[in-house]
Every structure is written in structure tokens, then in C-alpha cells.
Amino acid sequence: MDANLYNSRVIITFLEYLRERRPDIDIEGILKDSGISSYELEDEGHWLTQRQVDGFHDALMERTQDATIFREAGRFMSASKSAKAIRQFILAFLSPIQAYFMLGKIASYLNRGTTFHIRKIRRNTVEIITTINEGVHERPYQCENRMGSLEAVAEIFTGKLPILEHTECLHRGSGQCRYVVTWQEPRYMKWWRWRNYLMILSILAIAGCSFLFPSLKLAAFIALPAVTVIVGIAFYSQYLEKKDIYERTERQGDAANRLLDQITISYNNALLVQEIGQAVSNIMDVDSLLKFVMETLQKRLKFDRGMIMLTSPDRTRLIYASGYGYSSEIEAVLQKTQFHLDKPDSRGPFVVAFREQHPIFVNDIKDIKNDISVRSRDFVEALAVNSFICVPIIYEGKSEGVLAVDNYRSHRPHNQSEVNLLMGIAPQIGISINNAKSLRKIKESEERFRNLSENSPDIIYTTDNGGFITYINPVAEEILGYATQEMMGRFFSEFAMADGGKTFNQFFDRVWQGKETIKNMEAKLLAKNGKERLFYMSGAPNLNAMGEMMGVVGILKDITEQRKLEQQLHHASRMNAIGRLTGGIAHDFNNILQAINAYNERLTMRKSDGDPELKYLINIKELIKRATDLVGQLLIFSRKADSKLEPIDINAEIRKFYELLINTLPKKIDVELDLDEPLHTINGDSAQLGQVIMNLTVNAKDAMPDGGRIRIKTKNIEFPTATYRSSVKIDPGRYALFSISDTGCGISKENLDHIFEPFFTTKEAGKGTPAFDSYRHILTF
């Protein structure tokens, strides 16, 4: 991005010079070719880039072919209206030597690209060294213009151009520009020096006469003419000084008036910003806010008319919202006018300012008539617009509308300062509009929440940071029997069983300390009639606008009846599966086991204690016993009898089966144990655990006909928060992980969904362990 280096007064001085000395030159064409807008020059606080001033030079040279014009324009600063404030500043130093020594400060008002160093040579001669700041690339014409400006400084005091010697130049290979300026001193300065010299001589003469002529009368007679001459010279030098001051004052023109006008404008602008800022925090209705803003703009700014257009709810159109200065007929037209934002080819100024988020500044509507649509031209003609400023109203990077002003009566030209002011006001309007909309949304949200809460079938609650209930909806009375006032200001734990309060305390501690959202934690509350109700309890931090914790907000979903139905369905499904299983195989399987056991007993009786085959028969007997236990387990399920749960060391149970697996499985299958010690103790049924081990290892053996490896692993794990695995909730706590893996062929994707179906198998008839498969399905419930 180009740096802003040169104040607009530099170009304004050029334009004044051209209008006065070269009226034949097309100034508008030069500005257009150089990329400098007229509104940029209207603002004396605006700064131009090197590219813009170079463009101005090129356009001017193309039309004049006169290189001396730049030095002449620099000299014109002593007479330019735009430089009156600078001249006033210079004249405050009373003499050229003082003004030149303040040249660095004076130049900073016009040029940010150079640095000045000044050295006094004589009373009326100074040396000025100019260096270029880093990153700045000057061209020779700027050196010429600077020499003219340096000459103008002395001319402001003396009315005559000084003698300027340019002994070194950046553009002639030197590292700096060196100027020596010599000016003609004002006449009163010369008479001052003559007065001072004569006074010294007179004093010496009087002293000498007093010594040579003792007579007082004779000494006075000799000194009187000298005193008369000195007094005359003093009066004459004073006259010349006053005359010089008067002439300089005349040259200052109306700079003071312009300064007072600027102070008035700045004061009004400050009041405007203050009043709109107060409206931002006090007015929360959009229509009232926009009306106040328009009234404030009308009172504080010198625009004939102004309007605000905002987006429609679907953000496809700009719609008139408020304005001032329009007749009732034109206001009726505005209320019917809409500008489409959903048409990519829309070229209207309002739409462009809205989309591109930059101001549109037009001092003559004729300049853009060919660039806008027919509909926009009709709109401009209907409003009799000659010039206007349009700025986008932006909030958090998103356009909300546009603010537009114009002068149709005064035809006063706009300037960049006005654009900057409106660009500063527009975001405040955007903030105000957003605040008002947010408040409206909050009220609407509160109303929706109230309707939702009062008609919800679930209990909706809030608590403070102490855990006290601050809100609970009316359905709580229907479910628990307590009136709303009976529950307000109390803890949930007060409505739980003696051992249930801990659950609620842990729940709220987790929300408060971890600021986490907890969903569907089971909790029990006692109704007023003493009956226990089961709930899914959810809660989340209730934060204010600053992100600070205000308490907890959540829902209690009554699942008492749902849980009963689930248990009934669960039991019915289990009994149905067990019924089919036991009805189909239990009787025949038991007979087969008895026959196998009989044969095994007969074989055992024929073996001596030292027979090496006896151990295999003993293992067979153990397997028959476990198969018999399996049938017994199936009968337990069919009779709806609960298993006996007791503390189990899973590692110990695995080691019991390890030797059996080593002796039972083929030698080409290795069994590895990877057991975590010490392992958490669990509550379970050792018989069921044994069936799981046998079932999984036997199926693993069938998946590895060519041999492989079975790995049995245990590990301690802990879940700090509730975790869901395949839609199954695992509560926070410590667990023992038990897994069996093998290097077999695995399970195909199409069979994964069927692995827990009773009697489902991929093995051929007569192979596998369908009873174990079905038993595993039962255990999953």
C-alpha cells in the first residue's frame, strides 16, 4: 500500500497558481489523469501518495511542457489562500531567520518524506540540508518545487524573493540537497542598527565633552543634536516596523476566521459523536433510535438531507428506515423504494457501498450518470440530488445498511473530512441497531423459553452457584407432587433418598468445576407421595454475557415408566430366546452329556494311576462338568433366576483356564497372557466368565486352521467422564478391561451385524459351538 506523504495543500497551491497564472490549462483533466479526487483536495487534513503527486506532475507536463512551473508554484505559497494557515504560523516567528530555523516543523505540515537541517551563516543567510527519508523516492520536479517554497518563506517577511544557491542535489549524484538562502533585511532592521550605533557614539561623545568642557551648558548644547537624531531614528524605525507588521497582517487575510469556523465545526462534530454515543446505550428500540440519529445529524451537520436504509429480514433488499429534510411526497417515494442486494449486476451507489463496504462520494451527479442503472438514475432525478455521500453501516464485518446525506439547496461541495466523520458515525449506528435487535431477540427468546418451559413434558430447572433451585417449570408439580414454591430455594438432594443425594452433589460439582455439559445421567427423586421416580438428568453451565458462571440449567426427563417397559421387554426377549434355546437343545444336550460322561467313566476305570492318557480323561470329565454347568445356567435364565455376583479376580480366573487351553488347543496355536497387575476386582459370575473365555478361544481356534496366536489381555482403565460406546453409556469410574484377540481370518463385514443373533453361525453343519454362541448372546443382555 502506498504511503501518504504529501498534504493536499501542496496540490491546492498548484491549482490556485494555475487558475490565476495559467487559466488555459484543463485542471479537471489533470486531476482525473493523476487519480486525485476533488473531495480529497477539499479536506486540508488529507494526505496524498507519491504515485498521485507523480501522476499530477506527468499530467501537468504533458499539457504545459514547462519545467519551471513547479518552482513558480512553490513561490506562490506566499500568496496562496490555501497556505494562509502556514503563513500565519511562519509570521509568528517575527523574522526570517527564526522561521527558517523552524522549517522542519513547518515542513511536517506539508511533507512527510524529507528531513531538514538548518545552520545560520549570517544574519540574513542560512544553509538548509535536505535528506530523503527511507523508502521515499523523490523526483527532480519536487526539488524545484522545494526551492520555490524556500524562497517563499523569506518573501513572506520581505515581500521580495531571496537569493537561493543550490550547491548540491540528490538528483545530481549527491546524497543530499544543499541550499544557501540569502534575503534582504527589512528597512526597520537597518534603522535599528543605525540607532544603536549612534546611541553608543553619542554616549561616548557626551562623556568626552563632559571631560573636555567643564561647563554643563556647553556639554548639553553639544549633546542635544545627537539625542535629537537618535530619537528621530528610533521613531522612524518604529514607524517602519509597525508598517511592516500591518502589511504582514494584511497578508494573513481571513486565516483567523477560517480557524474559528474550523473550531465550530469540530465542536459540533464532538457533540454529534457524544449524543449518538449516549443514544447507543439508552435507546433500545430500532425505530426510535434511527429517528434520534437523524434528528442529531440534522442539528449538528450542515447537510440538507439525510437517510438510513437497512436490509430486509432476508437480507435481499435495502429498505428506507428513517430520514430528514425530505418533503412528504419524496418520503412517500422513499418508503416504496427498494434496492435489490440479490442481483449480482446491481450497480447503484447504495448497493455498491453496501457490498464493497467503502464510502461513495460524488460531488457532481453528472460524473456517474453513465455508470449507474436506469432505475438508479430515475431515483436520483426524483430526489433532485446534485451531490451526495453514502457510507456503509457495518457491524462486526457485516453490512447492515447505508447512511446517505446530500446538499440539494446549498450546493455546498463535500470533503473528505465529512466522509471520515460519517464513516466514524456509521459503526456506532450499526452497534446501536444490533443492540436494539439483540434486545428484541432476547425478549422474543424469553417468551419462547417461557412457552416451551410451561408446556414441556420434562422438568426444566435452573440453579444458582450454590446449588439452590432458582427456577422450575410447572410440570414438576405434576410429576413429583411438590408445588413450585416448595422446591424453590432448595437443593435437589433434599428430594432424593438418603443414599441418592451424593449423585446430585457429584453431578453439580462436575458442572461447576469442569464447566462441562452432562447428558442423561440417571438420578432418582422421591415424589411427595413417597414413590421413587427415575430421571435422565442433564445439565450445563448457565453463563452470563461475560462468560461467568451463574449456575446450572438443565432438564429432568422422567423415565420411570419407560424403564419399567424396557425391563419387561428385556425380560420377554430374554425369556423368548432362552425358551427357544432350552426347548430345542437342553434335553438332547443333557442326554448326550450323560452318555459321554458314562463312556468317560468306563475309560477312566480301565486306566491305572500312572497311565499317561489318564490326564486327558480327567480333562474330558472337567469339560463335561462345565457343559453341565452351562445347561444349568440356561435353566437359571429360563426360570428368571438371578446370577450370584461376587468379587472376582479376572486374572485368577484366566490362569485357571490357561492350562486347560494349552492342553486342549492344537500345538500349532500359541496362547499368550498379557495381564495387568494388580487388576481391579469386579463383581461377576465366575461360571459365566469361564464360558466367555471358552467360547471366544474355541471360535478363535476354528478361525486359525493353519495355526496362529491367541492373546488374552487385561488392563486397568478409568473414565473421568461419562463415555458412550456404540450407544451404550459407561459411567465415570474405574474398570477392568478384558480382551481376547487372535491372528485368524477375522469376521467379514456382512456378518458383523449378526454376531449376537441366537444360533447364527458361519460354520458348516456339525461344526463350531452354537450353544456357546447363543450363550454369549444371552450374556450381552
Image: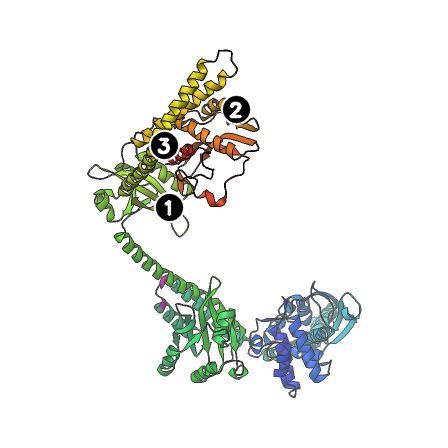
| Residue corresponding to mark 3 | 585
Label 2, label 1: how many angstroms apart (C-alpha)? Answer: 53 Å
| Residue corresponding to mark 2 | 662
Which residue is at 57% across, 75% downward?
40
Report if residue 200 lies within the magenta region: no
| Residue corresponding to mark 1 | 540
Q: Which mark is residue 236?
A: none
Horizontally, residue 40 falls left or right of residue 451, namely right
Report if residue 283 lies within the magenta region: yes
For the residue labelled by badge 2, is the local secondary structure a helix, a strand or a loop? helix
Q: What crowding class fits label 2: few (fewer than 14 Cα within 10 Å), some (14-19), or many (20 or more)?
A: few
Q: What crowding class fits label 1: few (fewer than 14 Cα within 10 Å), some (14-19), or many (20 or more)?
A: many
Residue 764: image x %, image y %? 47, 37
Label 3, label 1: how many angstroms apart (C-alpha)? Answer: 52 Å
2 or 1: tag closer to the N-terminus = 1
User: Start and end of the magenta stretch?
Assistant: 281-286
Q: Quadrant of the N terminus?
A: bottom right
* 723 or 414, nearer to the observer: 723
Q: Is residue 616 above or below residue 754?
A: above
Check the image and name the residue furthest to the left. 529
For the residue labelled by badge 3, is the local secondary structure a helix, a strand or a loop? helix
* 158 or 235, nearer to the observer: 158
- State how the image is colored: rainbow
Q: Nearer the viewer, mark 3 or mark 2?
A: 3
